[in-house]
Image: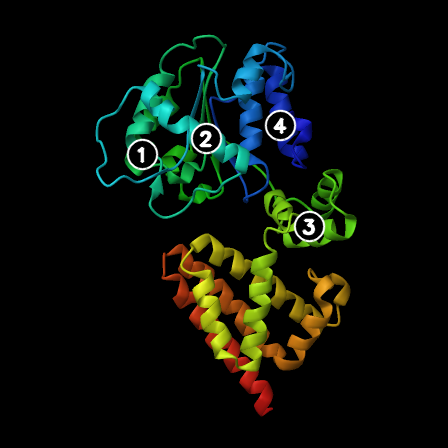
Amino acid sequence: MSFARICGQDRAKAIVAAWLRSRRVPHAVLISGPPGTGKRFLALELAKALNCQARGEAACERCPHCRKMAALAHPDLCILLPQKKKEEEDRQSPPWEEVWAEVRPAAQEYLEQELSLTRSRTNIPKKHLLALQRELSYAPMEAPWKVALIFEAECMHPAGANALLKILEEPPAHACFILVSSAPQRLLPTVLSRCQRLPLQRLGLGELAAQLEQEGVEPQRAGVAARLGEGSLQRARQVAAGELDQISQQVEQFLQAGVEGQDGVYWELVEELGTDRLRLEQFLSLSSHYLRDLFLLSCQRPAALARADRLEFLQHLQSRLPAERVEELAVELDRGFGCLGRNVHAPLVLAELWRQLRQGSQMRVRG
């Protein structure tokens, strides 16, 4: 994959090309931006281009360094990412070879399946960061640069992040750190101040739709997926592939049961959703699209609907739910996302949303 195959992000790619053209790449780069905007792939492409034998503005994809980097098999490429916490954490810093043997399979899966690892009980262990610091102090074995990629860097153990400060302040001439984060505000200020920021932006509807159509998605479905993608190519691909269809059906069941007072459906949905935080996040996110569309309908703007394919269902909801309650439900959704971030029990978040929905439908009946 070359820079040209990363969707959008023209400004960020131009900056990286200028770095490579002048051969003046910062020793510590922080690639930040919303999920699904291409951060991890831009980081890997930068690592490949740094050591590419063609020494151009992008990786050639053909030289031994490019092929080894792409396969995560280059001895001068180091990668860290969050790991599940173990009950008994070893406080000793193991050799980098042992760390890499543990991390490499997870890194391959993370990149191939575009996973998200920012969840409770995961972090980048201190011992891994200490091993990385030691490894980066050694000279490269084959390539001009020894490159460290730290994915989801906001999950670095605070003590381990502090341990990196010395090498970030005075990096070896051969070392380049590339940090990747969707939540850079969670990084230690001392780490942030030592990195060159490279922010990525949410992708536009046109960019998402064009990319999906290029990948063979039918235009109408590509348009719906782009609107539901929230600026994320990963999420738009999930929608286009039908991976969120079941959750969409559950959202519709939830909303319809709420306005019709069918409490039995609510309990069935609670059991189906369980306590999986990621699934509930997807449920709440899709719910917000339906509420936004209800608001747009009340403003006589049907052309702007994200779920224009579900217009009849939305009109039915609109007839049962007062417009003023739609805004209150949207506020409750935002509060629910905040509660999930504080690890509040997932069913409690759903219960409060249900209560608000039932109150809204009752107001319309009484009116």
Badge number at residue 125? 1
Q: Amino acid at mark 4?
A: Ile
10 Å crowding of disc 4: few (<14), some (14-19), many (20+) = few
Q: Earlier in the sequence, mark 4 or mark 3?
A: 4
Q: Is residue 18 above or below residue 356?
A: above
Badge number at residue 107? 2
Q: How many marks?
A: 4
Q: Amino acid at mark 3?
A: Ala
Q: Residue at x 42, y 55 (%)?
A: 276
10 Å crowding of disc 2: few (<14), some (14-19), many (20+) = some
Q: CA distance from mark 1 to mark 2?
A: 15 Å
Q: Earlier in the sequence, mark 4 or mark 2?
A: 4
Front: mark 3 or 2? 2
Q: CA distance from mark 4 to mark 1?
A: 32 Å
Q: CA distance from mark 4 to mark 3?
A: 26 Å
Q: Are marks 3 and 2 in contact (CB under 8 Å)?
A: no
Q: CA distance from mark 3 to mark 2?
A: 28 Å
The quadrant of the rendering that contains the N terminus is top right
Foreground pick, 295 / 228: 228
Q: Are marks 4 and 3 in contact (CB under 8 Å)?
A: no
Badge number at residue 15? 4
Q: Is residue 11 above or below residue 230?
A: above
Q: Earlier in the sequence, mark 3 or mark 2?
A: 2
Q: Are marks 4 and 1 in contact (CB under 8 Å)?
A: no
Foreground pick, 109 / 300: 109
Farthest residue in the bottom direction?
A: 366
Q: Amino acid at mark 2?
A: Ala
Q: Secondary structure at mark 3?
A: helix
Q: Is residue 39 above or below residue 363?
A: above
